[in-house]
C-alpha cells in the first residue's frame, strides 16, 4: 500500500483512470489530484530519502506518446508494452536501477486501453532481432508487460493486469507475458484469458529471496500462486500457461543444494500436466546500476565486485559485469540437466 496516491488531471479524464480512482478509493486510500500533469514532491534531502518518498508514492498518469512506439525485448518476448513504470518492491539487485530516470516512483498508466488497442497494429510483426521463438511468420506476436514494474504488485490498486489479460484473451495473434514476485492471484483465476497469457513467477532460493527481495511475497507463496494459476479450471485453478523465471541465479555457497531444493519444490507442486516454460537469468550489473543500488541500499550484502566478474560489452559500448565463463558453464550445465530431468516437457526458453 502506498502512503501517497496522486492522479494527474489528464489521467482522471480517462475512463480507465476513473476506474482506478474508484478501486483505490474502495481500499480506503486518500487520493490527491494534481492541478496539471506534473507530479511534484518526490525529492528528499538525499538519494535515500528520495528513494523512500518515491517508493511510497503511486502516481496515476497518462503514458507519454513515446510509450506507444513499442521496443523489442529479446529474449523475453517480441515487444515490450509497459502498463506502468516503477515497482513497489525493494530488490537490492533491482533491474530498474539505472534504467529509469528520476525518483523510483510507481507511475501506472490511465490510458492503458488505448495502448492495448495500439498493440493490435503490432500483431504479426516481429523485431529484426533473432528471438527465442524463431521466425515462424504465423506464430502469435508476444508482448511483455513486466519490463519496468511488477504488474501483480500493483494490481490490487490498478486492475491493469486484468485489463491486459482480458484484451489478449480476445486476440488470436497477440499473446501476453508477465512475470511477478507477488502472489495475490485470486482475481485472475476466472478471467477469460483463452490461453493467450503466460503467467511467469520469478523464483530463487529462500536465502536469496529473504536477503535481497524486500517487500515481495515469500518463495513458497509464489509457488502456491503459480500452482493455483496453472491448475485446470475444473480443479479450481486458472488454467493459465505458466512459466518459471529463475532469476537472478547466483553461485552462492551451496548453490547446487539450494537450487536443487527449489527445483524439487517446483516439481512437487506442479504435479499435473500443464503448459510450462522456464527462463534462466544469471545476475549481472552495470557501472550505472551499481552506482544507483549502492545509494539505495548502502548496506547491501549483494556481491557486485567487478574484479571477480567477466566484463561484457554491448554494441552501444556499454559494459556489464557477468559471472566468469567457467562459473557460467558450470551453472548452465547444472540447470539444463536438472530441469530436463524433472520437466522433460517444459521447454527451456533461454539462458542468459
Ligand atoms: Fe526491481 Fe523487479 Fe524487484 Fe520490482 S520486483 S524491485 S522491478 S527487481
Image (tube, rainbow, N blue to C red):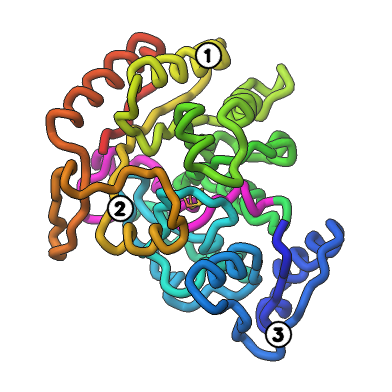
Residue 348: within the magenta?
no
Toward the viewer: 22 or 4?
Answer: 4
Question: In the figure, is residue 95 to the left or right of 4?
Answer: left
N-term mark: 1 or 3:
3
Residue under circle 2? Answer: 126
Location of the N terminus by quadrant is bottom right
Q: Nearer the viewer, residue 149 or 286?
A: 286
Residue 76: percent from left, percent from top: 36, 44
The residue wearing badge 3 is 34
| Dot placed on the residue nearer the N-terminal end, 2 or 3 | 3
Instruction: Give the image location of residue 318, x and y in percent.
Output: 18, 62
Distance between mark 2 and mark 3 Cα atoms: 39 Å
What secondary structure is marked by label 3? loop
Q: Is residue 52 above or below residue 133?
A: below
In the visual, does 279 lie left or right of 336?
A: right
Nearest to N terminus: mark 1 or mark 2: 2
Give the quarter of the figure containing the C terminus. top left
Please indicate whether residue 294 sits to the left or right of residue 310 in the image. Answer: right
Most common SS among magenta residues: loop
Residue 311 visible from this viewpoint: yes
Q: CA distance from mark 1 to mark 3?
A: 50 Å
Say if disc 1 is inside 8 Å of ligand 1.
Answer: no
Query: Is 136 colored magenta in this rendering?
Result: yes
**Magenta residues?**
126-155
Q: Secondary structure at mark 1?
A: loop
Quick check: marks 2 and 3 in contact, CB under 8 Å?
A: no
Q: CA distance from mark 1 to mark 2?
A: 30 Å
Residue at the (35%, 50%) spot, across then down? 78
Circle 3 Cα neighbour tier, 10 Å, few/some/many (<14 / 14–19 / ≥20): some
Q: Which residue is mark 1?
A: 273
Amino acid at each position: 500500500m502506498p502512503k501517497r496516491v496522486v492522479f494527474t488531471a489528464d489521467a482522471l479524464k480517462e475512463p480507465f483512470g476513473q476506474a482506478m480512482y474508484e478501486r483505490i478509493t474502495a481500499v480506503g486510500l486518500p487520493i490527491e489530484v494534481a492541478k496539471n500533469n506534473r507530479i511534484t514532491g518526490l525529492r528528499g534531502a538525499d538519494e535515500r530519502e528520495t528513494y523512500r518518498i518515491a517508493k511510497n508514492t503511486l502516481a496515476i498518469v497518462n503514458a507519454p506518446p513515446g510509450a506507444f512506439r513499442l521496443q523489442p525485448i529479446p529474449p523475453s518476448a517480441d515487444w515490450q508494452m509497459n502498463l506502468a513504470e516503477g515497482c513497489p518492491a525493494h530488490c537490492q539487485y533491482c533491474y530498474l536501477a539505472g534504467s529509469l530516470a528520476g525518483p523510483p516512483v510507481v507511475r501506472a498508466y490511465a490510458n492503458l486501453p488505448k495502448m492495448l488497442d495500439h498493440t493490435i497494429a503490432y500483431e504479426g510483426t516481429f523485431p529484426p532481432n533473432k528471438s527465442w521463438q524463431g521466425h515462424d511468420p504465423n506464430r502469435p506476436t508476444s508482448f511483455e508487460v513486466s519490463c519496468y514494474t511488477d504488474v501483480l504488485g500493483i494490481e490490487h490498486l490498478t486492475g491493469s493486469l486484468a485489463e491486459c489479460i482480458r484484451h489478449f484473451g480476445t486476440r488470436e495473434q497477440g499473446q501476453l507475458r508477465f512475470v511477478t514476485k507477488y502472489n495475490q492471484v485470486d482475481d485472475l483465476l476466472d478471467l477469460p484469458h483463452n490461453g493467450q497469457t503466460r503467467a511467469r513467477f520469478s523464483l530463487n532460493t529462500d536465502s536469496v529471496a529473504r536477503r535481497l527481495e524486500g517487500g515481495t511475497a515469500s518463495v513458497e507463496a509464489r509457488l502456491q500462486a503459480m500452482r493455483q494459476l496453472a491448475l485446470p479450471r475444473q480443479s479450481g485453478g486458472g488454467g493459465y500457461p505458466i512459466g518459471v523465471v529463475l532469476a537472478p541465479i547466483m553461485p552462492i555457497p551451496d548453490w547446487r543444494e539450494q537450487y536443487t531444493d527449489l527445483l524439487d519444490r517446483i516439481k512437487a507442486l506442479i504435479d499435473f500436466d500443464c503448459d510450462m516454460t522456464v527462463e534462466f537469468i544469471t545476475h549481472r550489473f552495470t557501472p550505472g546500476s551499481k552506482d544507483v543500488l549502492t545509494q539505495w541500499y548502502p548496506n547491501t550484502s549483494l556481491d557486485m565486485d567487478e574484479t571477480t566478474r567477466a566484463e561484457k560489452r554491448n554494441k552501444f559500448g556499454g559494459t556489464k559485469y557477468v559471472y566468469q565463463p567457467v562459473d557460467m558453464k558450470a551453472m548452465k550445465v547444472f540447470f539444463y540437466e536438472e530441469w530436463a530431468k524433472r520437466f522433460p516437457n517444459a521447454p527451456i526458453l533461454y539462458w542468459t
